[in-house]
Amino acid sequence: MATVTGSSTVGSGTSVHSITHSLNNSAAIMTAAVPNWNTTVWVASRAANDLTVYFGTEVGSGGGLLDWRVQT
């Protein structure tokens, strides 16, 4: 099992964000997503090296940070 972790800066007003994990596996799953603003997060699509997440609440005017973990 391969695991990649990271943090992504998310711009203000954003409700969709792409995460590049480079695992070369479209079956990779997000096992953790921790935003620093009050919202929900869900995976909308997956590809071999990235996935797209949606936020239930857009990022506020100061921007945000999303800590994440992806595994195969």
Image (cartoon, rainbow, N blue to C red):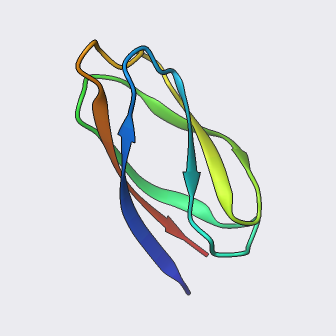
Q: Which residue shows up at 29% across the image and 31% down it?
A: 64
Q: Which residue shows up at 43% across the image and 14% down it?
A: 13
In which quarter of the view is residue 52 placed? top right
Left or right of 6 in this view: 61: left
On the image, the x and y values in percent for residue 8 come to 38, 48
Left or right of 54 in this view: 62: left
Q: Residue furthest bottom?
A: 1
Left or right of 18 in this view: 64: left
Q: Which residue shows up at 69% across the image and 65% down it?
A: 49
On the image, the x and y values in percent for residue 39 come to 35, 23
Relative to 20, say whether 55 is above or below.
above
Which of 67/8 is in front? Answer: 8
Relative to 22, say whether 36 is above or below.
above
Relative to 60, say whether 63 is above or below.
below
Location of the N terminus by quadrant is bottom right
On the image, the x and y values in percent for residue 70 come to 51, 65
In which quarter of the view is residue 62 placed? top left
In which quarter of the view is residue 25 placed? bottom right
